Amino acid sequence: MSFRLAHAIICYHSRHRGVGEGDTKGSVLSVRRRPRPSAERLPLADLPLRAWFRRQTPSCSDVVWMLSREGLAYFRTMSETGDFMGTLDIHRATLETCGEASGTVVVIDVLRAFTTAGFAFDAGAEAITLVSEVREAYALREAHPDWLITGEVGGLPVQGFDFSNSPGGFVGEDLRGRRLVQRTSSGTQGVVRSTGAANRVAASLCCARATAVYLDRLQPDRVTMVITGSHPEGLGDEDQACADYLEGLIRERPVDLEGIRKRVRSAQAAQRFIDPEQRAFSLEDLEYALDVDRFGFAMVVRKEGAYDVMRAVDVCGGPRKVHG
């Protein structure tokens, strides 16, 4: 048995026993891995591994299977592909289908809702309440006069809102301790419509790696990525590109970052930011959206009373860039 194959078996076993960070130097995410909570949901082909997951330590029969032709083939494939999280189900959904999603849901909006939210958190915002309708935003500010409203309708600023849906609008702002309300046409809609999710996370390229780290710590059996920019006209490749990057991080596969950026730049939604006639869509905002992994926090959404409230959860040691 080759060293690489033996290493794959050892890594796979140690990861699912819940080893510490120091034992996984080769991990892209380098965070603690715990045993999966629902071994019964593994594919039928992985029946020998189900007892392994439940016990966390392989029995004699597990070891026999590991050294069998089938077991060695299984681990040989993993050693060649690097897919140590192959048992995780990852699906895609749209605004029209996200209500059916269960398990952990990642709602993606690169241009611009969750890029803007990232910059708001970086400016010190304590929390962001996500709403579907403009009237809800006004009602919340009336009830909480010190709260600020950000967002858009059809991509355009809304009269009476404190901020538009622009990440650049939060650069240099001091929002420490302030609460925000965000209403957008795509991103916040994806969150409020994902009613069947057990866990919800908002994401964009600026916090993608931090999102992947948070998911890795969560250890879900199923992840659904909601492509909020996907419409019948075929828009949304900027969000698809972000989802592809996220999936590459989760599965610890190499990702062409420059290719990801090129896809975002060429997406139909990005053309408004390149067109100088479109004054509500600045080129600066596009560049902010392309600042991959600028922040070291994940944006986690939980129900607080009647509303969906998003908070920044630091997972990479601070809010600034997690890699050069």
Image: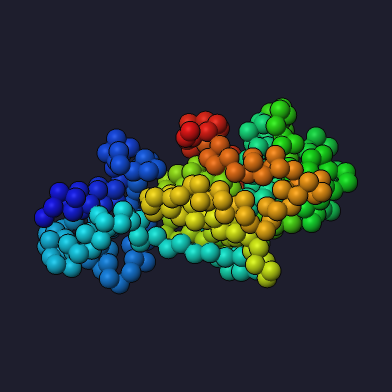
Question: What quarter of the picture does the N terminus occupy?
Answer: bottom left
**Number of numbered discs visible in the structure rendering:** 0
Residue drawn at the location 26% of the way across and 52% of the way down: 12
* Residue 200 drawn at (x, y percent): 56, 53
Drawn side of residue 175 relative to residue 222, left or right: right
Drawn side of residue 256 relative to residue 189, left or right: left
Quadrant assignment, res 26:
top left
Drawn side of residue 32 relative to residue 94, left or right: left
Colouring: rainbow
Q: In this view, does 257 lie above or below 95?
A: above
Q: In this view, does 30 lie above or below 108?
A: above
* Residue 221 drawn at (x, y percent): 42, 59
- Say which of 174 and 272 sits in front: 272
Residue drawn at the location 29% of the way across and 48% of the way down: 15
* Residue 117 drawn at (x, y percent): 66, 42
Residue drawn at the location 48% of the way across and 37% of the way down: 315
From this viewpoint, is residue 281 visible? yes
* Residue 40 drawn at (x, y percent): 34, 66
Drawn side of residue 43 relative to residue 101, left or right: left
From this viewpoint, is residue 141 visible? no
Residue drawn at the location 66% of the way across and 31% of the way down: 124
